[in-house]
Image (spheres, helix red, strand yellow):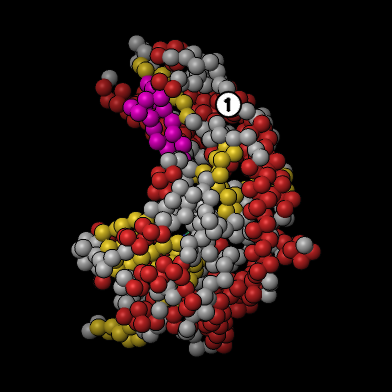
């Protein structure tokens, strides 16, 4: 335990207060924090070593080049690739998959060929394949999951056929934590004549990766989830495949000789590294790997499992807690819902207590669709988290659950829903500005917004019609519009997220009962800036509020055009 405490100490960002509370960082699947050693290496590069690589005729450039290429070797041995030529620097997993789709798949695929993906994939492992399928006429097939969130292995075998040219799947699901039995799947795919791409974004930080043992053809990961800087990632590819692939991006560095009569390309790995690379990022990534290698990774993995088990044990006792996905083999990622509480609300309430989680679809919308959910709340644990933090998290969740279900103002119907709203009547934007700016802290403002949201008349279930539904990115809302004899527009709106109801109330205070021209001219972003909410609750964020504001403005536009 002492050793774990010493490791935790090396991550400065973990030792700060957020919303006046000690930070509990449980969003490690999104990005990990960085150890001192990595921060120091990046800083040192810019202080004393900065030079471009592979091109300068001077000492600094030669040193930078050596360090940069040594970093490549560090990555090679980290994943046990056969040679440094198989390690291509990218910006991250996303860029790596795009490179494979455009450089490997696009020249290869023909109409009738199939790309096999799974329901667990992150959008980064879906959209590049959709684009190349459109470009080539190939078809995407999708391996389903079982109800507990495992890949349906018999279905995987059935979907594999001589038509399958590429199988691309995640090693660990970022949304459910499922660890896929990759080595066996690679063998099956190879027997069917397909090549295999593994999205290792979530696996590289938690599992020991041996690309030769896995047998995969391509493997991708991002530095920033592996305790290294953002903007650096790795594409591993089997040399024979990489050699046969045309360059993806072009420019400097990836050429041997350029003339207007033709250009010859550089050798591997430089053929795929056009332009000045992220040198400090590569050095930071190598340092992160050295840092990990200096630790007992098996002990770290054991600790992550202990954190996860404790979280499951404590959370399962919370009324209304529903775990989403129970994979047979799982990483330290806990996805869940809290009955009667919208995920966005839970995320914000945890944030008020300094607890950082992610809520929403986790860039896995097809998976959410399969689960029949708009999103989940996700706590993702790392070895630097403590059992105390898990307990804080569970007790915060317990308090939120005990807060009970949300009872808003009395449910009304039809015309009454417009008439009963205090917004745009007793409460206008000036009143809101006065109230909220008088409050010093974000937590106080947040509480006031929730109280204002309670004053917003709630729709009955019957009033939440498909016709009135406005789909935001992560929450649904409903909007009804009425025009009075003077031409003013009145709105009634509701949302399944409490925080969105609160924000709708703020918008209604400003726009309700106004003439269309005034509504169109109103600068909602400026209003939110004045309320000092932009950092937390910007209307331009992908939530239901943005969609509501757009619908309100559209109604005003239509109304102005018709009058
Ligand atoms: N694949 C998986 C499985 C991921 O989890 C992510 C990022 C990516 C690909 C894309 O990686 P990038 O570094 O290129 O952006 N996942 C998440 C997440 O779960 N929350 O934020 C980012």
Which of 363/154 is in front?
A: 154
At x 67%, y 55%, the residue is 307
In x, y percent, where is residue 457? 50, 19
Q: Secondary structure at mark 1?
A: loop
Mark 1 packing: few (<14 Cα in 10 Å), some, or many (20+)?
few
In the rendered image, which residue does mark 1 sit on? 406
In x, y percent, where is residue 368? 44, 45
Which of 562/209 is in front?
A: 209
Is the C terminus in the top left, top right, bottom left or bottom right quadrant?
top left
At x 69%, y 72%, the residue is 295
Q: Quadrant of residue 318?
A: top right
Q: Is mark 1 within 8 Å of ligand 1?
A: no
In x, y percent, where is residue 272? 39, 76
In x, y percent, where is residue 375? 48, 43
Image position of 94 with respect to 310: above or below: below
Which of 468/241 is in front?
A: 241
Image position of 503 with respect to 84: above or below: above
Left-right relation of 227 to 479: right
At x 66%, y 47%, the residue is 313
- For the image shown, how many numbered marks are present on the structure? 1
Image position of 93 with respect to 423: above or below: below
Q: Give the residues drawn in magenta, as a range.
A: 464-481
**Magenta region includes residue 470:** yes
Q: Residue placed farthest to the right in the image? A: 2
Left-right relation of 153 to 428: left
Which of 197/57 is in front?
A: 197
């Amino acid at each position: 335990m002492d050793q774990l405490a010493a490791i935790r100490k090396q991550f400065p960002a973990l030792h700060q207060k957020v919303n006046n509370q000690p930070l509990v960082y449980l969003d490690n699947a999104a990005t990990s924090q960085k150890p001192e050693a990595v921060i120091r290496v990046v800083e040192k590069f810019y202080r004393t070593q900065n030079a471009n690589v592979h091109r300068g005729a001077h000492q600094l450039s030669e040193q930078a080049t050596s360090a940069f290429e040594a970093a490549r070797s560090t990555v090679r041995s980290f994943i046990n690739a056969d040679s440094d030529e198989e390690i291509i620097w990218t910006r991250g997993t996303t860029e790596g998959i795009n490179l494979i789709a455009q450089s490997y798949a696009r020249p290869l695929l023909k109409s009738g060929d199939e790309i096999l993906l799974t329901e667990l994939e992150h959008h980064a492992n879906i959209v590049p394949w959709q684009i190349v399928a459109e470009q080539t006429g190939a078809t995407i097939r999708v391996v389903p999951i079982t109800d507990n969130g495992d890949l349906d292995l018999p279905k995987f075998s059935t979907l594999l056929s001589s038509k399958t040219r590429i199988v691309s799947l995640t090693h660990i699901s970022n949304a459910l934590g499922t660890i896929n039995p990759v080595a066996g799947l690679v063998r099956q795919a190879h027997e069917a004549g397909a090549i295999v791409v593994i999205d290792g974004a979530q696996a590289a930080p938690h599992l020991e990766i041996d690309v030769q043992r896995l047998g995969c053809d391509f493997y991708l990961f991002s530095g920033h989830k592996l305790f290294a800087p953002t903007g650096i990632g790795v594409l591993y590819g089997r040399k024979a495949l990489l050699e046969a692939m045309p360059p993806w991006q072009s420019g400097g560095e990836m050429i041997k000789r350029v003339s207007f009569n033709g250009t010859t390309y550089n050798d591997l790995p430089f053929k795929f590294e056009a332009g000045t690379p992220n040198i400090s990022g590569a050095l930071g990534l190598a340092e992160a790997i050295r840092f990990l290698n200096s630790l007992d990774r098996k002990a770290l993995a054991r600790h992550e499992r202990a954190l996860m088990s404790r979280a499951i044990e404590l959370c399962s006792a919370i009324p209304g807690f529903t775990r989403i996905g129970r994979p047979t083999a799982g990483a330290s990622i806990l996805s869940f819902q809290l009955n009667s509480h919208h995920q966005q609300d839970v995320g914000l309430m945890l944030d008020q207590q300094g607890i950082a989680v992610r809520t929403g679809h986790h860039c896995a919308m097809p998976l959410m669709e399969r689960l029949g959910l708009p999103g989940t709340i996700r706590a993702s644990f790392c070895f630097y988290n403590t059992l105390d933090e898990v307990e804080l998290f569970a007790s915060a969740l317990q308090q939120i659950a005990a807060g009970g279900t949300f009872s808003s103002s009395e449910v009304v119907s039809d015309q009454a829903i417009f008439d009963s709203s205090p917004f745009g009547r007793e409460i206008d934007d000036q009143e809101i500005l006065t109230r909220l700016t008088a409050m010093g802290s974000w937590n106080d403002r947040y509480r006031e917004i929730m109280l204002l949201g309670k004053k917003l008349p709630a729709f009955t279930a019957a009033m939440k019609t498909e016709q009135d539904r406005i789909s935001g990115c992560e929450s649904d809302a409903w909007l009804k519009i009425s025009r009075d004899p003077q031409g003013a527009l009145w709105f009634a709106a509701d949302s399944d997220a409490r925080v969105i109801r609160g924000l709708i109330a703020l918008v209604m205070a400003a726009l309700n009962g106004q003439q269309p021209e005034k509504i169109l001219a109103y600068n909602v972003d400026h209003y939110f800036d004045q309320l000092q909410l932009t950092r937390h609750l910007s209307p331009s964020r992908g939530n239901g509020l943005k969609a509501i504001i757009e619908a309100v403005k559209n109604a005003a536009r239509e109304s102005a055009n018709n009058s």
